[in-house]
Amino acid sequence: MMQGGEIFMTTRGINGVVLVLREGDITKMQAEAIVNAANAALVGGGGVDGAIHQAAGPGLMAECRKIGGCPTGSAVATSAGNLPATYVFHAVGPIYQGRPEDETLLRGAYQCCLDLAEKHGAQSIVFPSLSTGAYGYPLTLAAPIALSTVIAHLQRPTCLRQVTFALLGHHAYTVFEQALERLLPL
């Protein structure tokens, strides 16, 4: 996304893989896999989920109906319809309630997507910030969980070559950038 003529983007290299934070619209970013912030019923919704379903077209909803649902803290794969990707990984993050299991479930949703990327041999994946919209997970708590999960995965052998976080709005971008700086200082 351009703001004042600038594209806000941060990158880090981890074990030969590029980790990218980018402010912008996930439906316009190219990758083999795009992660959808889905609900457990996989019935579409607002926010990222609604935008992905709208951009992908009606075939995505038909595939989700066949799957029927996904437990919180997990993810399932479908084709990507009209999106610039091969797969959509529908990740179900927790509705934030301040419980210890919230972190476990959020970490699980990210890890399931990374595991699906390995299963499908995807070299690139784009994540939104899971659970931080309508599900109310505070960005300052969610960003380090998301990033540390991805970083730990990339420190092991992987087929991934690029992992991108598509962050909607400059506030989300800044929070993720600060968390990344704490986890992987330059």
Image: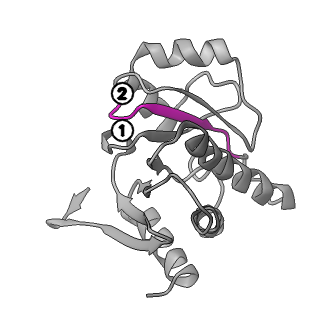
Indicate whether 27 appears above or below 54. Answer: below
Q: Residues within 10 Å of mark 1 (few under 14, many from 20)?
A: many
In the rendered structure, the answer to whether residue 103 lies left or right of residue 117 reads: right
Q: Residue at x 45, y 13 (%)?
A: 59
Q: Which residues are magenta?
A: 83-93
- Residue at image location 49% in from the left, 50% down from the top: 128
Indicate the quadrant containing the C terminus: top left, top right, bottom left or bottom right: bottom left
Q: Secondary structure at mark 1?
A: helix
Question: Where does residue 57 sit, x and y in percent of width and height?
Answer: 39, 18
Q: Are marks 2 and 1 in contact (CB under 8 Å)?
A: yes
Disc 2/disc 1 C-alpha distance (Å): 7 Å
**Residue located beneath label 1 in the image:** 27
Q: Is residue 126 magenta?
A: no
Q: Which residue is labeled 2 in the image?
A: 55
Disc 2: CA contacts within 10 A as few (<14), some (14-19) or many (>=20): some
Residue closer to the observer: 133 or 68: 68
Please indicate, yes or no, whether residue 134 appears anywhere in the rendered image.
no
